Amino acid sequence: MLARRARASFLARTGQRIGYLAFLTAIVVFAVGFATTFTERVATTLIVLLVAGSIVLAPAIVLHHAVKAAEHEDATSPR
């Protein structure tokens, strides 16, 4: 049980890092596009980064909360 929870926690952390990195990259791409020329390529890159970040980040956040809830339940349950 603990090994599965550790694996889920690792997946959640990795997913969050990837998702937030995609959003950060989208912000940088937007700033560069805004400062220079906002081309169709910049817009397409932004859309791809935002969609990919959302697809990765949403389940990672849910999984993170599930792991934390399981840890809390284990800590507070009587033995």
Image: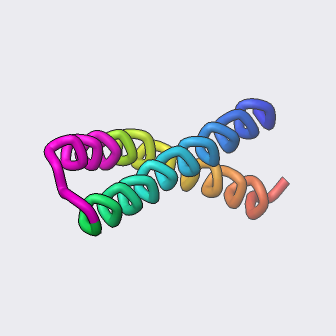
In the image, taking residue 55 as reference, residue 37 lies left or right, namely left
Residue 23 lies left or right of residue 44; in this view the side is right
Residue 75 colored in magenta in the image: no
Name the colour scheme.
rainbow
Task: Name which residue lies at 35% across and 39% down.
Answer: 52
As drawn, is 13 to the left or to the right of 24? Answer: right
Residue 50 image point, x, y percent: 31, 49
Tell which of 75 and 36 is nearer to you: 36
At horizontal 34% and vertical 44% (from top left) the residue drawn is 49
Query: Quarter of the image holding residue 59?
Result: top left
Q: Does the magenta portion include 44?
A: yes
Where in the figure is residue 22, as x and y percent of width and height? 44, 49
Give the percent coordinates (x, y) of residue 6.
Answer: 75, 39
Up/down of 5 relative to 13, above or below: above
How many marks the image carries: the answer is: 0
Q: What stretch is highlighted in magenta?
A: 36-51
Nearer to us in this view, 44 or 65: 44
Q: Can residue 9 be seen in this view?
A: yes
Q: Which of 15 and 70 is in front in this view?
A: 15
**Quarter that holds the N terminus:** top right
In the image, is residue 33 above or below residue 55? below
Residue under the image location 58 percent in, 50 percent down? 17
Could you tell whether 67 is left or right of 51 in the image? right
* In the image, farthest residue toward the right: 79
